[in-house]
C-alpha cells in the first residue's frame, strides 16, 4: 500500500516536472520567434554601421555604433 503510494507520488512529481519543462521551453521558443526578427534587424543595422565605419572614419557614427552596442543584445564586435 505504502509502496504504491510512493510510486504514484513519484510519477505525479515526474509529470509535473515534465509539464513544467515543456511549458518553459514553449515560452522560450515563442519569445525567441517573436524577438528573432527584431534581433536580426538590429544585428543587420550593426553590421551596416561597422562596414560604414570601416570605409570612412566618421566619429559621430562610431559613437552611435558604440551606443547601440552597449544597449542591445548583440555578439561582441
Image (cartoon, grey):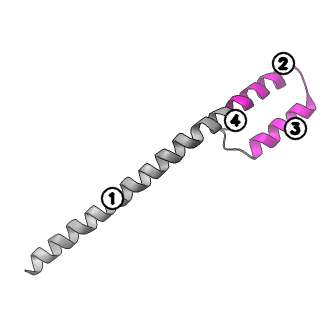
Q: Is residue 64 magenta?
A: yes
Note whether 38 is above or below 1 in the view shown: above
Q: Nearer the viewer, residue 18 or 77?
A: 18
Which stretch appears magenta? Answer: 43-70
Q: Taken as a whole, is the magenta stretch helix, strand or loop? A: helix
Residue 68's quadrant in the figure? top right
Task: List the residue tagged with mark 4.
Answer: 42
Q: Earlier in the sequence, mark 2 or mark 3?
A: 2
Q: Residue furthest left?
A: 1
Q: Would residue 29 be found to the left or right of residue 51 on screen? A: left
Task: List the residue tagged with mark 1.
Answer: 19
Q: Earlier in the sequence, mark 1 or mark 4?
A: 1
* Other-residue count near label 1 (Cα within 10 Å), few / some / many at <14 / 14–19 / ≥20: few
Q: Are marks 1 and 2 in contact (CB under 8 Å)?
A: no
Q: Are marks 1 and 4 in contact (CB under 8 Å)?
A: no
Tell me where residue 42 appears, x and y as whole percent.
69, 35
Q: Are marks 3 and 1 in contact (CB under 8 Å)?
A: no
Marks 3 and 1, how far apart in space? Answer: 47 Å
* Other-residue count near label 3 (Cα within 10 Å), few / some / many at <14 / 14–19 / ≥20: few
Amino acid at each position: 500500500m505504502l509502496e504504491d503510494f510512493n510510486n504514484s507520488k513519484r510519477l505525479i512529481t515526474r509529470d509535473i516536472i515534465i509539464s513544467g519543462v515543456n511549458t518553459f521551453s514553449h515560452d522560450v521558443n515563442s519569445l525567441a520567434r517573436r524577438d528573432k526578427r527584431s534581433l536580426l534587424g538590429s544585428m543587420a543595422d550593426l553590421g551596416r554601421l561597422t562596414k560604414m565605419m570601416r570605409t570612412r572614419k566618421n566619429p559621430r557614427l562610431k559613437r552611435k555604433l558604440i551606443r547601440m552596442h552597449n544597449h542591445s543584445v548583440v555578439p561582441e564586435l
